[in-house]
Amino acid sequence: MKKLLLIVLIVLFALTSIACSNNDSISNSLLKDRDALMERIKPLDNYIGVENSKGGSDYKKVLLDFMENHLKKEVVTFETINSNENNRSIVVTNKDGSIFKVILNNDKGIWFVVAYTEL
């Protein structure tokens, strides 16, 4: 299990490195230093509420659909930073260099985006 986690982290790091080389608007050091990214994203509280988001049983599909169709962003990476049975906070980096924190809620097995904020 630890090896799998290490492989996933290496792949995420490689993807963010590629994103940095293609787009200078995301700070290379911020994407490499995930702790610094988390320090900047966690205290954000200026969320924009989302009503009537498209729901689904797979939170990843719901997240990607929201980012691509609602916000018109091409996702490069995403990472859950906080979760429990009914809620999930996810940091999303995008091809255009933008970084979002997205909040999803689970209602009886169906995930919905309820709020987001941009870094």
Image: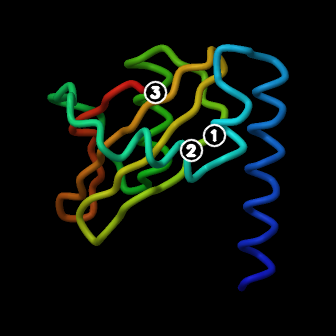
Residue beneath the point at 27% across and 63% down: 109
Residue 111 sits above or below residue 50 on the image: below
Residue 2 coordinates in the image, percent (x, y): 73, 83
> Where does the N terminus fall, quadrant-wise?
bottom right
Judging by the rendered image, the residue that carries numbered circle 3 is 67
Residue beneath the point at 30% across and 34% down: 54
In this rendering, would 118 be left or right of 29? left
Residue 107 coordinates in the image, percent (x, y): 18, 58
Q: Nearer the viewer, residue 85 or 27?
A: 27
Q: Are marks 2 and 1 in contact (CB under 8 Å)?
A: yes
In which image quadrant can residue 74 be found? Answer: top right
Q: Residue furthest bottom?
A: 1
What residue type is disc 3 on?
Met
Q: Residues within 10 Å of mark 3 (few under 14, many from 20)?
A: some
Judging by the rendered image, the residue that carries numbered circle 2 is 78
Judging by the rendered image, the residue that carries numbered circle 1 is 77
Task: Report, in whole angstroms, how far the alpha carbon at label 3 lies from the one at label 2.
Answer: 11 Å
